[in-house]
Image (cartoon, rainbow, N blue to C red):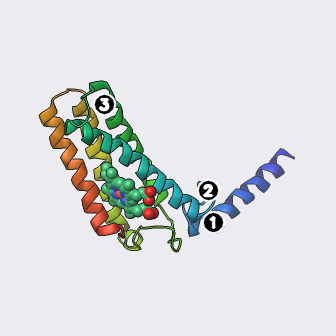
């Protein structure tokens, strides 16, 4: 009896993977492409709010707070590690997204840009611990350039 159940459940699992997974590697994570789009857009918004708060502190428009700056830097890095899921294997949902179709035709390049973002935000989080503003500013600028370069190539206005 146990054997039959095992065989049946294995058959069930393999039928899911051949139908949906081939079509979309993240089908088991998101209910739809629209959900995936919302997920990545929300992640970018959260990352952006944290990043801009860091900019206000660096520009002296807001009082410097070492602990808060570090928290923001950690948030930016943590969120950067979540973004790729929202793009992986997704097709273009019409009218819902600013993501250019080139992302999926140039996946290796896009994915490496996201990898750079993860590496660079990690460096920023690390250097933030030192409180050395000159070094922090230079890493902050490096991250900002990655945001801009990717938007220029892969995001519609
Ligand atoms: C590897 C490419 C890439 C990098 C790096 C990147 N972005 Fe984006 N970003 C995109 C794409 C593509 C979209 C459009 C997403 C969509 O509409 O589906 C986007 C959208 C956004 C949005 C709009 C979100 C919304 O609500 O629609 C904000 C804000 C944003 N990015 C901020 C940032 C910031 C800040 C950084 C750097 C810390 C950054 N991005 C780095 C590719 C990137």
According to the picture, the residue beneath numbered tag 1 turns out to be: 20
Q: Nearer the viewer, residue 137 or 1?
A: 137
Position in image of residue 73 (x %, y %): 32, 37
What residue sits 50% from the left and 72% below the top?
Answer: 92
How far apart, in angstroms, are the residues tagged by discs 3 and 1?
41 Å
Residue 114 appears in the rendering: no
Sequence order check: which comes first, mark 3 or mark 1?
Answer: 1
* Residue situated furthest left in the rendering: 134
Residue 133 appears in the rendering: yes
Q: Nearer the viewer, residue 59 or 9?
A: 59
> With 133 as the anchor, is 9 left or right in this view?
right
Secondary structure beneath disc 2?
loop
Sequence order check: which comes first, mark 1 or mark 2?
Answer: 1
Disc 2 residue: CB within 8 Å of ligand 1: no
What residue sits 42% from the left and 67% below the top?
Answer: 98
> With 37 as the anchor, is 154 left or right in this view?
left
How far apart, in angstroms, are the residues tagged by discs 3 and 2?
34 Å
According to the picture, the residue beneath numbered tag 2 turns out to be: 28
Disc 3 residue: CB within 8 Å of ligand 1: no
Nearer the camera: disc 3 or disc 2: 3
- Quadrant of res 75: top left
How far apart, in angstroms, are the residues tagged by discs 1 and 2?
8 Å
Nearer the camera: disc 3 or disc 1: 3
- Quadrant of res 106: bottom left
Q: Quick one: label 3, few (<14), some, or many (20+) residues within 10 Å? A: many
According to the picture, the residue beneath numbered tag 3 turns out to be: 70
What residue sits 70% from the left and 64% below the top?
Answer: 15
What residue sits 31% from the left and 30% below the top?
Answer: 70
């Amino acid at each position: 009896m146990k054997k039959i159940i095992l065989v049946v459940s294995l058959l069930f699992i393999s039928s899911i993977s051949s139908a949906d997974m081939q079509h979309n590697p993240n089908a088991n994570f998101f209910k739809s492409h629209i959900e995936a789009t919302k997920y990545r857009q929300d992640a970018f918004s959260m990352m952006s709010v944290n990043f801009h708060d860091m900019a206000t502190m660096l520009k002296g428009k807001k009082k410097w707070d070492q602990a808060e700056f570090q928290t923001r830097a950690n948030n930016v890095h943590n969120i950067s590690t979540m973004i790729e899921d929202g793009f992986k294997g997704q097709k273009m949902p019409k009218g819902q997204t600013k993501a250019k179709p080139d992302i999926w035709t140039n996946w290796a390049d896009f994915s490496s840009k996201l990898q750079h973002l993860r590496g660079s935000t990690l460096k920023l989080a690390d250097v933030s611990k030192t409180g050395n503003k000159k070094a922090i500013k230079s890493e902050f600028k490096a991250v900002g350039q990655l945001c801009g370069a990717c938007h220029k190539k892969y995001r519609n206005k």
